[in-house]
Amino acid sequence: MQNNVLILDFGSQYTQLIARRVRELNIFCEIKPYNKLPEDLSGYKAVILSGSPFSVRATDAPHPDLSSIKGKKPLLGVCYGAQYLAHFNGGNVEKSNTREYGRANLSHVESDHPFFNGIDVGSQVWMSHADTIKSLPGNTSLLASTHDVENAAFKFKGEETYGIQFHPEVYHSTDGKQLLENFLVHIAGVAQTWTPDAFVESTVTDLKAQIGEDKVILGLSGGVDSTVAAVLLHKAIGKHLHCIFVNNGLLRKNEFEDVLKQYEGMGLNVKGVDASARFLDALAGESDPETKRKIIGRVFIEVFDDEAHMVEDAKWLAQGTIYPDVIESVSGTGGPSATIKSHHNVGGLPDFMKLKVVEPLKMLFKDEVRRVGKSMDVGDERLGRHPFPGPGLAIRILGDITPEKVTILQEVDHIFIQGLRDWGLYDKVWQAGAMLLPVNSVGVMGDERTYEKCVALRAVESTDGMTADWVNLPYEFLQKTSNDIINKVPGVNRVVYDISSKPPATIEWE
């Protein structure tokens, strides 16, 4: 494709938001670490430099060679990116004397310049930096200021290179999307062709060319990602797709049977494999979250290797990997975007497994996956399902895993999720679940003292899981849910509700 946008990541917590805002303009973009610049830049029509926790004044500041980009392709530096462009081209960046963080308003705007088309004085922007550009390079012109930040936006003369010290990608910058559209569409001339239908058409064509007549094995989970991946592959290769739904013993209550039933009638070739004992045996006695994830990933691969041998001449393993999985699993800079947790469905396969990996959704955010699924007429029941972690309840049981703990959490989770449905709250929540905590607490039931488990309920609202806020569920709902759990689930005598946002907390507890 010739209409891509390249985002160079310098470690900002907002880098993924830049990508999302660009995608919302129906423009395809990719995030690459600043120190892994693609050798071939011919497919990119514009480049954006992200923010960073680093200072351009530091000796270890990220310092890529932009000679193949600056002055040759439209370039936009955001926050650190703007300071980088100023500092290394003759400007002066110093530590700010005033705290430049939070909401600000543009006090001066070159409104006749295409970069600020439709954006007026007073427009709210979001600042987040400790350094500031004290003086611009000599070959630049000032485009905008705020009351505290004189050099809020600037342009290099004779080239389409821009810098802004605020963040257009965050919600608080009210005209941020307009500014990105001005730069990408009206200045860089990037075509707005990134649509669900276009993605389906191009992906099906690519899959046909990539796979040909080979057989593909796909692990279905019942979730949005694997379902949409299956339908995409089915469109491309039809009967050559063999879907396998593995019961790892860590699914929700009755989920194995329910999901298999739901897939009936979708035209997919699906086989159910109950490997619950195999997974639980491998996890016995293990408490470390990362180790649990790796055990599940290993056993998952082993189960698929066994099943692959039953599909004659299978050549590929398909996975529902999506972009946030890739971003969270690949450290670019050592900053906030560094690896937070491993994903068992990201990366290659062990040498003993002679299958190649195909990941048709690996460049999509979760909301984009849903839109693609809708364009292929995947039912709302599948597309509206809350995300559920690949390791399942293993990372919602803090500490070691036992069949008894799994049963307790399945019952708790069932009461919580069914309650959300009954109260009409399920579709207002992006993801919900229960956590079994590794602590006992004293309680009283009847006239008897108890010393039993505590569970935490969590419900968040989000668009793609990169950031999330806790949901303010009705007190009456929480009261009834807590009461039902304590009365109906033996071994639990305390229920708490998690009111942490992401960041700083993750959605899952492990």
Image: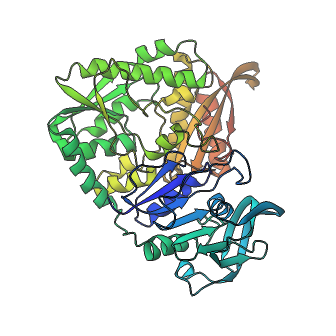
- Classify residue 99 as left or right of residue 342: right
Q: Looking at the picture, tell me which residue is in the foreground, 101 or 427.
A: 101
What residue lies at 38% left-to-right and 34% top-to-bottom? 221
Q: Looking at the picture, tell me which residue is in the foreground, 384 or 466.
A: 466
- Classify residue 101 as left or right of residue 356: right
What residue lies at 57% left-to-right and 87% top-to-bottom? 112
Measured along the vertical axis of the image, is residue 209 above or below residue 345? below
What residue lies at 43% left-to-right and 73% top-to-bottom? 185
Q: How many marks?
A: 0
Farthest residue in the right direction?
97
Measured along the vertical axis of the image, is residue 210 above or below residue 179? above
Residue 355 sits in quarter: top left
Q: Looking at the picture, tell me which residue is in the foreground, 426 or 443.
A: 426
Q: Position of residue 70 (x, y in %)?
A: 52, 63
Measured along the vertical axis of the image, is residue 220 above or below residue 424? above
Measured along the vertical axis of the image, is residue 439 above or below residue 102? above
Q: Quadrant of the N terminus?
A: bottom left
What residue lies at 17% left-to-right and 41% top-to-bottom? 238
Q: Position of residue 459 (x, y in %)?
A: 59, 45
**Residue 469 showing in the rendered view:** yes
Q: Looking at the picture, tell me which residue is in the foreground, 31 or 235.
A: 31
Residue 41 sits in quarter: bottom left
- Classify residue 412 as left or right of residue 449: left
Q: Position of residue 414 (x, y in %)?
A: 51, 34
Q: Quadrant of the C terminus?
A: top right
**Residue 266 showing in the rendered view:** no
